[in-house]
Amino acid sequence: MPASTVFVAPYALPSTLKFVSAAAMLPETVFGIIAQESRESFLARVDPRVGACVAGFVQVQDAHDPDQLEAAVRQMAGALGTGRVDSLIGILEPLQEALAIVRERLRIRGMDAAEARRFRDKAHMKDVLRANDLPCARHVLAHDRETALAFAREVMPLVAKPPAGAGAKDTFRVERIEDLESWMERVPPSPSRPLLLEEFVQGTEYSFDSVSIGGQHVFHSISEYAPTPLQVMETPWIQWTVLLPREIRTPEFASILEAGPRALDALGMVEGMTHMEWFRRHDGSIAISEVAARPPGAQFTTMISYAHDTDFYRVWAEASVFGRFQAPERKYAAGAAYLRGQSSGAPGHGAPGHGAPGGGGQRVARVTGLDEIRSRLGDLVVEADIPSPGQPKSSSYEGEGYVILRHPETDVVRRGLQFVVETLRVGLEG
């Protein structure tokens, strides 16, 4: 009997559709989609071969509402002709708790509500990590101004974020008590809207991306950011890179190879992929920043695929739907250079504050350096999304485009990424 799988995807975003396609085309599966846009609008952006695999489609007003989601899943069980749903999946972090609540209500296999909360509530997550003697940044969940200021006087600099934030999104650095006081005058913390404050960990930032099956850690990949995501968010014009070194079972990564799986066990990861961000401080110690119970974004899954010569979108789908996984060999180093527009008239890399996310009506005017990239890097480039003149400035920290490189030697990829960000320029006007 085929497995009945329902994918919750509020909108047909390009990054989401890669995972939708992988799940829809699994054999021995009856597949349905729950979305906030119409069937016609959603499937118009899907490959016709994938669309042919969609046996059911239910539109809801708010996919993050567990009650609406539960009603849609019940309706989908009938639409698929199976009378049941075996797998309820989705990749967006804000959806994970709602998905888990519905799984628990309808007795669908997978992460339950308590487990999802440990991943989604970043303050609760750090409490769990500390209780299990796992290294993480000092933190406090401040429900009032006095608690926030007391922590800030002890721990400075620090970062502030909402408890249910995703990565560096909505995160900002605080280096003076006066800055925190000013911010809390505008958005005062309260029991209903607490503020998560953390030690600002200084060092090199990495990710630890993993696959779990049946509650067991079965695979991991390590990536290095340059510069850190917070620096990228603070400096909208800066072009940045992510490097996946070929060799990761080295003394350099011994601490995270021990702590990473323990953290997943403590948080209760069941099946699928996770994205963990962690730091190596200047003294060599590590600190886990946060963990998301979802696949990584920003082309990470694509890079992991290139590094292993394996389609990790399909890997995620098979792990999530069937609970199966076969570990591939890491054959290459891989990496991405993210291309972000720079305002005209700005010296060097551009001017801070120019071309901020949202774009203010700015558009790509020119792209320079492509000939040099083609001449010097050649076959190292395995995928690229080059901005086109007239393209609106992106509202995402990923920028206007990217270039992905791959080679058996890590240093070759590292040098190539640096060459891309130093050579390729995206000029903005407007």
Image: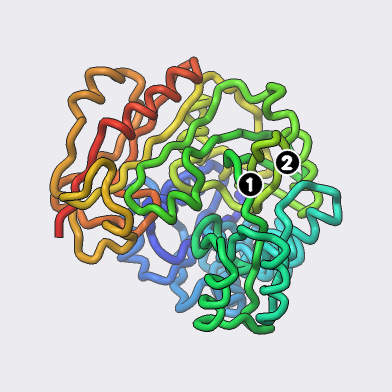
Mark drawn on residue 219: none
The structure residue drawn at horizontal position 17% and vertical position 35%, both measured from the top left corner, is 368
Q: In which quarter of the image is the C terminus?
A: bottom left
The structure residue drawn at horizontal position 42% and vertical position 71%, both measured from the top left corner, is 36
Q: Which amino acid type corresponds to the residue marked 1 in the rendered image?
A: Met
Q: Is residue 365 left or right of residue 402?
A: left
Viewer-proximal residue among 136 and 330: 136
**Residue neighbourhood size for the residue with mark 1, other residues' Cα within 10 Å, grouped as few (<14), some (14–19), many (≥20):** many
Asked if residue 47 can be seen in this view, the reply is: yes
Q: Which amino acid type corresponds to the residue marked 2 in the rendered image?
A: Gly
SS at circle 2: helix
Q: Report if the CB atoms under discs 1 and 2 are less than 8 Å apart.
A: yes
Q: Where is residue 216 shown, x and y percent of the image?
A: 77, 41
Asked if residue 52 can be seen in this view, the reply is: no
Which residue is label 2 attached to?
260
Viewer-proximal residue among 354 and 334: 354
Q: Is residue 11 left or right of residue 390?
A: right
From the viewer's perspective, is residue 259 above or below residue 192?
A: above
Q: Where is residue 239 shown, x and y percent of the image?
A: 35, 42
